[in-house]
Amino acid sequence: MTVVDFDLARIEREQDNKKVGVADLLRYALANIDKGEHKDAKRAILCIIEEHEDGRVTLDGYRCGLSRLEEVGYLEAYQAQRLRAWWADA
């Protein structure tokens, strides 16, 4: 018998990522790692964005396997990759 986590299945089908909570997203990413989707992963970056009631926005982050300089470089590379994919879909 296969156990299906319906919350994770919902995230896979969700077209609007604004309906997915932070904790749900983290569980989904961890489930994918546990399934071996990123079997060669050695480093990671996580950016947390907090939107306060008074309108302020604060950023916090976590990283593993990276120096601060590498963190910035990989963030730039990821941004460029996402922009290329965005333009390819347009």
Image: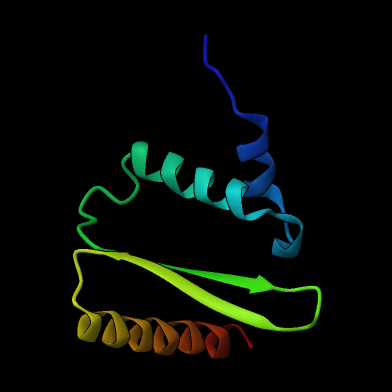
For image coordinates 59% across by 24% down, the residue present is 4
Report the front residue among 27 and 40. 27
- Colour mode of the rendering: rainbow
Report the front residue among 9 and 48. 48
Report the front residue among 59 and 7. 59
Query: In the image as oriented, which residue stretches furthest toward the front?
Result: 54
| Quarter residue 66 falls in | bottom left
Q: Is residue 38 left or right of residue 86?
A: left
For image coordinates 57% across by 52% down, the residue present is 25
Instruction: Reply above or below: 20 against 35.
Output: below
Quarter of the image that includes the C terminus: bottom right
Instruction: Reply above or below: 11 against 53.
Output: above
For image coordinates 31% across by 41% down, the residue present is 36
Q: Is residue 65 left or right of residue 30?
A: left
Query: How many marks on residues?
Result: 0
Query: In the image as oriented, which residue stretches furthest toward the top?
Result: 1
For image coordinates 41% across by 84% down, the residue present is 81
Instruction: Reply above or below: 88 against 65.
Output: below
| Quarter residue 73 falls in | bottom left
Residue 57 position within the rendered picture, expressed as x and y whole percent measured from the top left: 66, 81
Residue 18 position within the rendered picture, expressed as x and y whole percent measured from the top left: 74, 64
Residue 63 position within the rendered picture, expressed as x and y whole percent measured from the top left: 31, 66
Residue 78 position within the rendered picture, expressed as x and y whole percent measured from the top left: 39, 81
Q: Is residue 55 left or right of residue 71?
A: right
